[in-house]
Amino acid sequence: MPKPTSTVHIALNAPPGTGKEGEEARMSLSAVVRVGRHLFLGSDETATLERVTDLGGGRFGEHRTYPLAELLDLCGGPDGEVDIEGFAWDPPYLWIAGSHGRKRGKIKRGVSDEEGAKSLAKVKIEENRYVLARIPLQEDAEQGGLVPRRSCPDPHDPARTLTAARVKGRGHRSALMRALRYDEHVGAYMKLPGKDNGFDIEGLEVRDGRVYLGLRGPVLRGWAVALELLPQEARREGRLRLAPVEDDGTPYRKHFLDLDGLGIRELAADGDDMLVLAGPTMGVRAPAAVFRWTGGLTTDRPRVVRGAELERIAELPHDVEGGADHPEGMCRFDVEGSDHCVLVLYDSAAPHRRDSSGVLGDVFTLPRPHGLRAMASRLFSHDDPGGTGVDA
């Protein structure tokens, strides 16, 4: 297992008046993206965005918290858990994805057998989890940099207004969930909780308005699933519709990835390639790794991705020290002297990663794309559709 090139300390001591978001975020980081000199962070336990700023010397601080309810109309109310699982920066918008998954009750320590069984039978739908949205960022000197806004002028076209918007529909009846409910591959998993190999979004990347979602589950006979969407402005302000992606009008495209039986935990662009953070679908001790999907951001049809197009390029710490360290957040994080680095953050971070004010993330230097592998990928992608295409 490669050692990290360096570590980054992220101070998450929330300012007064924000309750315990700092403590919660330190223990439940699930998404990260770098935007200029800032990191935007998400937690799977809160309904807020966290922003920290580069202070130099491998330190990020000046923590600010932004309640999502001040930026978007949340179906589950201002305090309902959003379960943020993905961020992506596609200027001028910061994109955010909730898990879109159901939640099974836990058996708590010390309860009776009967109480434990009852808890395990309960499955919750939390409407705020079904958020897929974009939020404009605006430079604000008084707040130290880029700030999320419900609306603001476009800095490149002052006559145009940038607006926050989410995919239309209410909660688990959103346009995305309605589109997928009868899908031949994932439809049967929509009502299963995420940690039961049910439907669960954990990866997000956006390029030129085209949205890529990585599914932690379901994993179908060892194959992970990624979805491709094209959200566009809806008639109602603050809403997005799903435009057709396929010629038959289907508003999504599916890709199947051979990740050695693992699910997708995060996505990040590296040029035209897609970096895929992969981990176990269910709550079991299993490896975590980074894969490179060569040309993943340029494909124009449904794909079965394997062989020369998909390379396992890094192993990550996972389930150390009695079950801690679950790699969940990953973003490009180039450092001086290397332009192929990623920052990895951990849910349930191990004790050695935490202090009273923040957490440590790992920076890994990834191998550069192999020229022959990239050439093979292009050949498979365009000249042999019968060999790899879902629609063959």
Image (tube, rainbow, N blue to C red):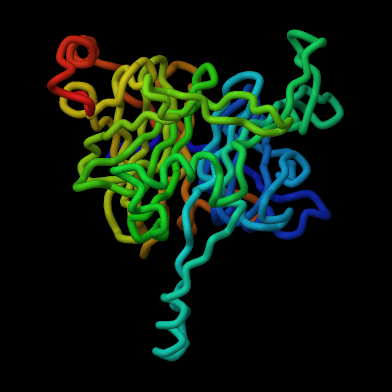
Residue appearing at x 35%, y 56% in the figure: 319
User: Relative to residue 328, is residue 57 depicted above or below?
Assistant: above
Q: Is residue 154 left or right of residue 106?
A: right
Extreme-front residue of the structure: 248
Q: Find residue 203 and report its horizontal and vertical position in percent.
A: 44, 38
Q: Position of residue 121 (x, y in %)?
A: 42, 76
Percent across and percent down for residue 217 are 35, 49
Along the line of sight, the residue nearer the viewer: 181 or 83 = 181
Q: Quadrant of the C terminus?
A: top left
Q: Is residue 340 left or right of residue 379?
A: right
From this viewpoint, is residue 65 visible?
no
Most distant residue in the right direction:
142
Residue 126's image quarter?
Answer: bottom right
Q: Is residue 43 above or below residue 313?
A: below
* 56 lies left or right of 143: left
* Residue at the image point whose x is 61% and y is 25% from the top: 35
From this viewpoint, is residue 134 visible? yes
